[in-house]
Every structure is written in structure tokens, then in C-alpha cells.
């Protein structure tokens, strides 16, 4: 985790203190269940809870032990025994390291997902507000980067809202997918631990029982989780890239907020660069980069190996921390985005009405002209306007072949901008549930 791109709430989830606390809770809940089943003394389970809950785990001491034993869970259990005393002999009865490590990881991923869902809700709140603000702000729609037909800036934002709504649903599904617990012992057979212990721990930790584990929780669950984060990152990049394009000097339809005292360049005092959006594109690349190793973690040897362990120690915190930061940053960009309606209208009119070519085409077909002939008539005038030989409407009005079928009034009606916005309310109701 890089502090520059880390927010405190997400960082806490991945801190050593949180990890050790979750490990303890898993062990203590397991001890409770074992005590109820008569496997260990109830008094021992109570003392494990009392002493462990009050203890502050000494990270340096755990690391010291680990340097000797070369095993992180053993090091923790040794330190826990130092804190708990003789009753610690009843800790970890019949359990294996993966029972603790995998259940803990899933708790952390669930908590991280909860923060990401909240981030997506905040982002969409900002998008929704700005979408309604610019519901009818005309702008040019582009395909292949070239002027196509009119749209509105509100509709552009509505597209993003719908996309991040799907993102929220996907993260919720990923959260559900990974929210399982395994306390099944070596190779997952429950030979040394009762399945009822697993059920109790799962309930207490807010998880579901893993139907079948092979000493580890199956990694296809985690692959799905990180793949979902990668899709969310791709959506962040899509919107960030749109903002970057709209801020280009030749377009300047929207612009990141530029705060007083901010500097855009060390060399050129005039510069106002889309640095936040560019940063988001880079962060999105990193989140997506974690998807492949998560996929490769699925194919482990037999009932388990630890080739996934080093991967998850990195991608667990890094992917969630980075995505959390990126979503918060994007929400801030949208919230303060400077929009230039006049520039949008100027760009919309830049080609002298060419954006209405389809309406003229359709008007001709309605008059009995074949589509092929109508296309030829409209295109020959459009290409003249494209080359700067005149205004599209004027050229059409002067074309005898066109005027044979369309009056000047009929031509003018094909250049009505509001025609393109007749169904905005319908789209907004579909996306936002209101117009």
C-alpha cells in the first residue's frame, strides 16, 4: 500500500493489528464452539476470550518468533499463548493454518467490499446530481471521435450512472461470493474438528459455511472478486478518459476543477492539465493488473499449496486500497467538474448543421426517394460542407434534386435540435427511476 493512494478506513482493514485481531476472534469463536460441544473446558474458552480480548498484540514479538519458526500463524499462536497462559493449549484444536488465514482474508475482503459499495454510492450521487443539472445541455455525440448526432451532457452522465450502478451490483455479488468460512482442518475432512465449530465461527464472523474446502477455500471465489474489481476499474478509466478528451484545448467542453494556487506545470504557467483523470487511468491499470494473478491462483496443487499466499498478501490490500482511492477521487472530479455549455454548443454547430444529415436522409425517403438515392443526395452536399464550401442547409436548399422532394420549410424542420431530445425523460426514468 502506497500512502499517496491510501485512505485511512481501507488501510485499517489491511493493518497488522486488524489481521491479528481477526485471527484471534476466529480462534476464540472456535474455542467457544468446542467448549459447547464438550471438546474443551468452558472455563478455558472464557479465559481465552477475556485475556485475548484485553491484550494488545505485540507485532515486533510476533515477527521475532516468526524469524525462528518460519511460520506466521505458529508465531501468532505462540505469542497468544504468552498472553493467555495455560489455557492457550486449547486454542487451534484440530485446526490448520488455512482455517485461520482463509477465513480472515475473506473477512477482510468483505469489509473492503462494503467500503467499495459505499464509494460507488457516493460516486453515483455526484453523477446523478450533475446529470440532472445538465439534462438538457446540448452537446455533440461523437463516434470514432468524429461528430455524429446531438446528445446532451446529462445523457453522457446518465450512461456513467448506469454503468456504476452495475458496478455496485457486481461488487455486491463478489462480496457474497467470497463471504465464506472454512474451519475444516487438514485437507478439509473435519477429521480433527467438528463441522459445528465451522458453522459457529461462520455465523459469528458474518460469513457462510464453505460447502467443501480442501484445506483452503477454493480460489475461484477470489478470482471472481478481483475480476470484478478489474471491471470497476475499467469503468473508472472509461469516464476518466472521456473527461480527459473533453478537456482538450480544441474541445474544452468540461474541465477538472483548478483550485486557487494550483500549478499545472513547472515550466508553463498557463497550463491547466487533467492530472486527476490521468491519475485515475494509471490507477485503473494497476487494479486490472491484479486480475491475472488472482486467476492463476485458482490452480493450486492437490488439496493446497502456498503459491497463492504471496500473491494475495499483495493484491488483497493493493487492489482494494487503490480502487477505494480511485472511486473517491472520481467522485470529487465529478462533483467539482467545470462544464462549458457555450463551448458545447459552439462545437455542436462547428460543422454547419452536418449533424442533421440523417434527418434529411429520412425525410427524403419519406417522400418516396430510395434510400440509396437519398444517401447520395445528402452525402454530396455534406461533403461540400465538410470541405468548407458552404453551409449544409444552404447547400441542400440550392440542390434542385433535393428541392424536388423537400420544401424549404420541410428542410428547416430537419434541422430542429430539440427533435433529438424528445425521449430524454424516458431514458432518465429508466436510469434514475425519475425524470
Image (spheres, grey):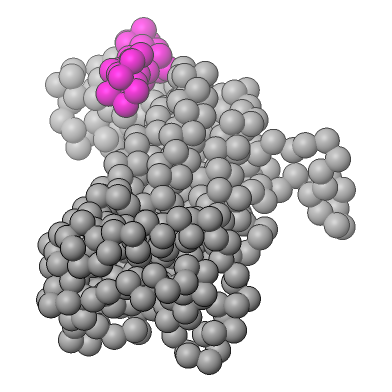
Q: Position of residue 415 (x, y in %)?
A: 40, 18
Q: Is residue 298 left or right of residue 379?
A: left
- Judging depth in this view, the residue of 90 and 121 nearest the camera is 90
Residue 109 in percent (x, y) is at: 38, 57
- Tell me which residue sits at (77%, 37%) in the image: 259
Residue 410 in the magenta stretch? The answer is: yes
Is 179 rendered above or below residue 254?
A: below
Q: Residue at x 71, y 48 (%)?
A: 273
Q: Is residue 286 magenta?
A: no
Residue at 28% in and 27% down: 361
Horizontal and vertical percent position of residue 312: 41, 72
Q: Quadrant of residue 24?
A: bottom left
Residue sitting at 60 percent across and 70 percent down? 58
Q: Position of residue 355 (x, y in %)?
A: 42, 30
| Residue in front for this viewpoint, 212 or 429 | 212
Residue 363 is left or right of residue 267, and the answer is left
The picture quadrant where one finds residue 406 is top left
The foreground one among 424 and 208 is: 208
Span of residues in magenta: 407-435
Of the pair 199 and 130, the residue shown nearer to us: 199
Quadrant containing the C terminus in the rendered view: top left
Amino acid at each position: 500500500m502506497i500512502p499517496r493512494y491510501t485512505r485511512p478506513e481501507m488501510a485499517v482493514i489491511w493493518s497488522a493489528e486488524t489481521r491479528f485481531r481477526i485471527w484471534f476472534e476466529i480462534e476464540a469463536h472456535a474455542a467457544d464452539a468446542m467448549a459447547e460441544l464438550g471438546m474443551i473446558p468452558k472455563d478455558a474458552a472464557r479465559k481465552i476470550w477475556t485475556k485475548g480480548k484485553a491484550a494488545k498484540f505485540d507485532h515486533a514479538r510476533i515477527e521475532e518468533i516468526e524469524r525462528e519458526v518460519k511460520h506466521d500463524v505458529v508465531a501468532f499462536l505462540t505469542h497468544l499463548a504468552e498472553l493467555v497462559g495455560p489455557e492457550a493449549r486449547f486454542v487451534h484444536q484440530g485446526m490448520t493454518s488455512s482455517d485461520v488465514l482463509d477465513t480472515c482474508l475473506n473477512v477482510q475482503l468483505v469489509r473492503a467490499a462494503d467500503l467499495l459499495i459505499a464509494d460507488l454510492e457516493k460516486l453515483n450521487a455526484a453523477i446523478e446530481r450533475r446529470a440532472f443539472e445538465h439534462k438538457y445541455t446540448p452537446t455533440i455525440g461523437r463516434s470514432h471521435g468524429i461528430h455524429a448526432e446531438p446528445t446532451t451532457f446529462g445523457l453522457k452522465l446518465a450512461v456513467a450512472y448506469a454503468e456504476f450502478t452495475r458496478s455496485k451490483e457486481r461488487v455486491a455479488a463478489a462480496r457474497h461470493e467470497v463471504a465464506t468460512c472454512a474451519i475444516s482442518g487438514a485437507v478439509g475432512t473435519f477429521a480433527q474438528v467438528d463441522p459445528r465449530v465451522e458453522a459457529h465461527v461462520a455465523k459469528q464472523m458474518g460469513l457462510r459455511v464453505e460447502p467443501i474446502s480442501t484445506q483452503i477455500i477454493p480460489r475461484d471465489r477470489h478470482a471472481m472478486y478481483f475480476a470484478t474489481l478489474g471491471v470497476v476499474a475499467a469503468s473508472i478509466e472509461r469516464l476518466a478518459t472521456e473527461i480527459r478528451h473533453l478537456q482538450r484545448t480544441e474541445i474544452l467542453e468540461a474541465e477538472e476543477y483548478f483550485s486557487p494556487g494550483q500549478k499545472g506545470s513547472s515550466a508553463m504557467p498557463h497550463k491547466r492539465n487533467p492530472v486527476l483523470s490521468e491519475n485515475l487511468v494509471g490507477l485503473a491499470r494497476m487494479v486490472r493488473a491484479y486480475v491475472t494473478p488472482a486467476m492463476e491462483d485458482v490452480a493450486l496443487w492437490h488439496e493446497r499449496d502456498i503459491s497463492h499466499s504471496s500473491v494475495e498478501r499483495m493484491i488483497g490490500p493493493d487492489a482494494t486500497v487503490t480502487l477505494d482511492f480511485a472511486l473517491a477521487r472520481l467522485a470529487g472530479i465529478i462533483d467539482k467538474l467545470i462544464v462549458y455549455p457555450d463551448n458545447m454548443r459552439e462545437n455542436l454547430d462547428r460543422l454547419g448543421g452536418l449533424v442533421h444529415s440523417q434527418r434529411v436522409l429520412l425525410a427524403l425517403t419519406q417522400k418516396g426517394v430510395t434510400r440509396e438515392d437519398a444517401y447520395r443526395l445528402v452525402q454530396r452536399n455534406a461533403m461540400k460542407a465538410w470541405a468548407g464550401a458552404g453551409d449544409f442547409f444552404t447547400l441542400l436548399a440550392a440542390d434542385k434534386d433535393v428541392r424536388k422532394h423537400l420544401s424549404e420549410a420541410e428542410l428547416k424542420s430537419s434541422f430542429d435540435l430539440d427533435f433529438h431530445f424528445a425521449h430524454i425523460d424516458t431514458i432518465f426514468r429508466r436510469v434514475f427511476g425519475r425524470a
